[in-house]
Image: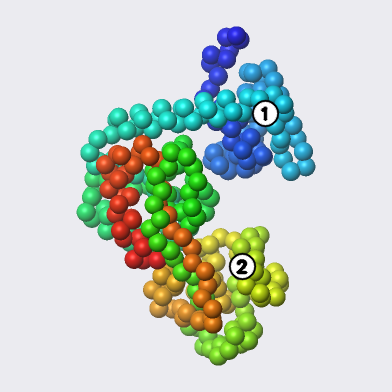
Amino acid sequence: MNSSLHHLSWDLIGIFVAVAETGSLSAAAKQLNQSQPTIGRQVKAIEAELGVSLFYRHQRGLGLTEDGEALLPHAKAMHAAAAQFLLHAEERKQSGFAGSVRVTASQVISNYVMPKLIAEFRQAYPEIQIDLVPSDDAQNLLFQEADIAVRMFTPTQLDIVAKKIGETPLGLFASKAFLERVGMPMTREDLFALDWIGYDRSDLILRGMQEAGLEVDRDFFSVRCDDRVTYWELVRAGCGVGLGQIGIGVEDDSLVRLELEDPLPALPVWLASPHTLKQIPRIKLLFDFLAEKLPKLL
């Protein structure tokens, strides 16, 4: 065996797995919070270390070579083993409540819901520090990117403890200033004649409206933005009608909820945490606190 393989970095193995799973250097760089050139150099480093080519380029990014396909299952197993090693080490190291807990939630939940809950929790447990990670990307709990995740979809990772804590209904909202300017819509036709706010590159809202039988396209939206917090601020500023979580919208005195004949679908709300980490007292404490308090604010 090549003696240099004894010094093969665990980080390089993780980068190989990330690039293989995402299919591009840019996506892997975003997932790992590194620059694309850095990921590119590290891919070259692991190929040089192993003496084989792992990827080939195609129009959509990077694909696995035959050698890459053969090595990927072993790299995943090594990466998972390293993650489990770190998780168990953390579990052995920590006892009691003192320490930090890393929580990830969507941009909207992080901005408009979590601050109230963190303030209440910290009043009761000042010895526990909270790291809040606002993100609409699915953080990898297994590899300690977060200790607890608030998900708006069913978690599918293995070795994850997941608990559905409720649903958050969606509604249509517009600012009072906007409605004073254009008038309150009295019919469905009036409502769809107003300015609407949609997403830009994401087709989530557009697809949902089309599936509901509404004949709309991208040009139906007068203003478009993919960032969820900025989107909500556009609604609050009076740029048009927008979609939002009812629990957040009704708490805002500057907004008016606009009723449709048919209710909009609700989003499921899940809490998730790695199985081993959830046994750490401070993580279990915050997990149970969020399971009790979060549904009341959604």
Q: Where is residue 38 in the image (x, y as percent from the top left)?
A: 61, 33
Type of amino acid at the residue the image marks with label 1: Glu
Q: Can residue 289 be seen in this view?
A: yes
Q: Relative to residue 133, is residue 199 drawn left or right?
A: right
Q: Position of residue 3 (x, y in %)?
A: 57, 9
Type of amino acid at the residue the image marks with label 2: Gly
Q: Residue at x 69, y 20 (%)?
A: 52
In the image, residue 86 sits, relative to residue 240, either above or below, namely: above
Tags 1 and 2 touching, CB below 8 Å: no
* The N terminus, quarter of image: top right
SS under mark 2: helix
Q: Residue at x 60, y 72 (%)?
A: 197
Query: Closer to the camera, 224 or 261?
Result: 261
Disc number for residue 208 = 2
* The C terminus, quarter of image: bottom left
Q: Relative to residue 79, is residue 150 drawn left or right?
A: left
Q: Which of marks 1 and 2 is nearer the N terminus?
A: 1
Residue at the spot of label 1 = 69
Q: Which residue is drawn at 50% across and 82% down?
A: 259
Q: Residue at x 59, y 85 (%)?
A: 188
Give the colouring mode of the picture.
rainbow
Label tally: 2
The Cα atoms of the two marked residues, 1 and 2, are separated by 37 Å
Q: Is residue 244 visible?
A: no
Callout 2 crowding tier (Cα within 10 Å): few <14, some 14–19, many ≥20 = few
In the image, residue 150 sits, relative to residue 81, either above or below, namely: below
Q: Relative to residue 225, is residue 254 drawn left or right?
A: left
SS under mark 1: helix
Q: Where is residue 242 in the image (x, y as percent from the top left)?
A: 55, 73
Query: Closer to the camera, 240 or 270?
Result: 270
Disc number for residue 79 = none
Query: Closer to the camera, 194 or 67?
Result: 67
